[in-house]
Amino acid sequence: MANLFFEPENLMQSMTRFHDAKMQSPRHGVSWDDNDVPRSSVFDDTFYTRSDGQAETAYVFINGNGLPERWTDAANFSIAELGFGTGLNFLETWRNWIAVRSPSQQLVFTSFEAYPIGADDMARALAPWATLKPLGEALISRCQEPPRLPAFWQMDEQTGLHIIPGKAEATVARWDGLADAWYLDGFSPARNPDMWGPGLMQQVHDHTSPDGSFATYTAAAQVRRNLQAAGFTVTRRKGFAGKREMLLGRKQPEPEDHSAK
Ligand SMILES: C[S@@+](CC[C@H](N)C(=O)[O-])C[C@H]1O[C@@H](n2cnc3c(N)ncnc32)[C@H](O)[C@@H]1O
């Protein structure tokens, strides 16, 4: 396969910004539950739902952010994610994007990940979904060790993938991008509180474009309060499969400044 590793000049600055976070951490340990669902040995939680991870991504993150409808008429669209994990959310998003995009549109997907898993675990975790196979192979071929992070990969002519290593509490603050849609996908708030704290939720908000959105599978009260305090209008809706509720939200418009009049 051709090496499409992509380091255009306008991305080099961002690359330098995250250089000190270059991935040197040991590989994220993974064990396997029934049905071969991957479980983190660090956080003792699964990377995706036991029922159907691909369907959960479509319901919670894609549909929860109003996609693919919001792609219509968008020349450029930016998605950011907390927690790249197995790459499932990215791949399902890429698959949907390919199905509906028009030739001139561009999608950039940026994911913040502190404890990347190995390429072999990624391949095993993605194996259940035949519709993701060719896209998954394209991703896994770029994730072979030794890993090269931060990664700026042009996955096809209309899709860029950025993986930014390091703890999101620090790296989102240093990111110079804005997301039109956020996927908040840390492990459960009880096991992975750093991914849901008020400081990080504020950074997520501050790195959201006007009228941008977020979606997440959790409806934990403290997470909802942190997102509201950050400035999002938060809505609860029915969760995926057995989950009672999930959260989605929009950035509130900035109050008009009348002082200069
Ligand atoms: C539920 S998994 C994400 C699943 C992923 N979106 C997918 O499609 O497979 C949560 C991810 O958050 C990462 N993570 C946990 N704490 C983090 C932190 N403080 N900063 C950045 N990433 C973190 C974990 O390593 C893990 O990959």
Image: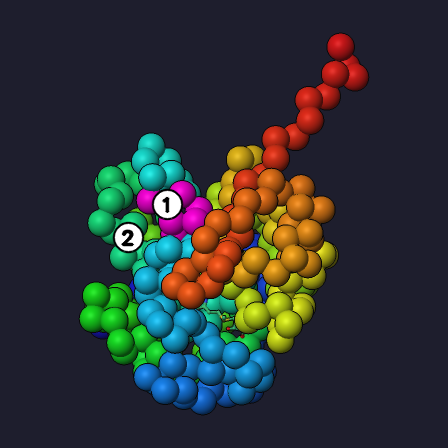
Q: Which mark is residue 67?
A: 1
Q: Are marks 2 and 1 in contact (CB under 8 Å)?
A: yes
Write the residue at 55% across / 40% down: 250
- Which residue reaches farthest top? 261
Residue 190 position, x and y percent, is 64, 72
Residue located beneath label 2 in the image: 96
How packed mark 1 is, by other alpha carbons closer than 10 Å (few <14, some 14-19, many 20 or more), is: some
Residue 249 position, x and y percent, is 54, 44
Give the distance between the C-alpha atoms of the residues marked 2 and 1, in whole angstroms: 9 Å
* 191 up-or-down from 80: above or below: below
Secondary element at tag 1? loop
Magenta residue span: 62-68
| Quadrant for the N terminus in the image | bottom left
| Residue 18 makes an appearance in the image | yes
Amino acid carrying mark 2 in the image? Asn
How packed mark 2 is, by other alpha carbons closer than 10 Å (few <14, some 14-19, many 20 or more), is: some
Residue 248 position, x and y percent, is 52, 48
Write the residue at 65% across / 30% down: 254
Answer with the quarter of the image where residue 141 lies: bottom left
Magenta residue check for 102: no
Mark closest to the chain's N terminus, 2 or 1: 1
| Residue 21 makes an appearance in the image | no
- Front-most of 19 and 88? 88
Asked whether mark 2 lies closer than 8 Å to ligand 1, one says no
**Residue 144 shown left or right of residue 176 in the figure:** left
Secondary element at tag 2? helix
